[in-house]
Amino acid sequence: MLTGYLRAHFPSQPVDEYTTEALEELLAPYPAADAKQAVLTIAQRGEKWCSPTDVQAEIRRIRAQRVADYGPIEPPADLDPDNVVGYQRWLGAMHKGIADGTIAAPPAIDVGQHRDVIAELGHIGQEIPDA
């Protein structure tokens, strides 16, 4: 499917049975939607050619951007802080889920709920008045 999509966006690029094989080898670990988005992004940049490694590089950029946009990743409270291997597995699964797009960004804090705390913190950094 991706080979046909690639050919549609880059009609002058030669595509043969090895192109499909190369795409399959390089892109197997990634979701098909990411590969399709990568081809579209490369085409929208006005590139004349699109190699399988170009697609792979664009997929990696897309996935890295998802992780960067997510923000800080806080471990769950029930995760044992002394279990390093457990933490590494949890963090790896979180990174993969965020990069895959299956874990969405955490909900924003409702400022209305915490208005009193925000008002109290608003004084931090100001000089203490003389009594």
Image (cartoon, rainbow, N blue to C red):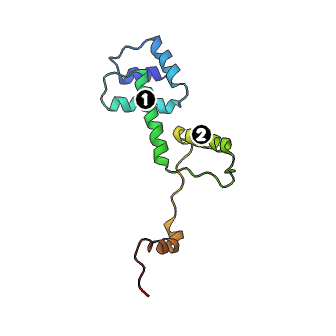
Pointer 2 residue: 92
Q: Residue at x 53, y 56 (%)?
A: 107
Q: Amino acid at mark 2?
A: Gly
Numbered circle sitting on residue 79: none
Q: Is the C-beta separation of discs 1 and 2 under 8 Å? A: no
Q: Which residue is mark 1?
A: 57
Tell me which corner region of the image, top left, top right, bottom left or bottom right, holds residue 3: top left
Name which residue lies at 57% across and 40% down.
97
Could you tell me residue 83's position as x and y percent? 69, 46
**Residue 115 in the image: above or below residue 13:** below
Q: Nearer the viewer, residue 12 or 51?
A: 51
Q: Is residue 70 above or below residue 59?
A: below
Ranked by sequence position, the earlier of labels 1 and 2 is 1
- Residue drawn at (35%, 17%) of the image: 13
Residue 111: x %, y % from top left: 49, 67
Please, what is the three-letter code of the amino acid marked with disc 1? Ala
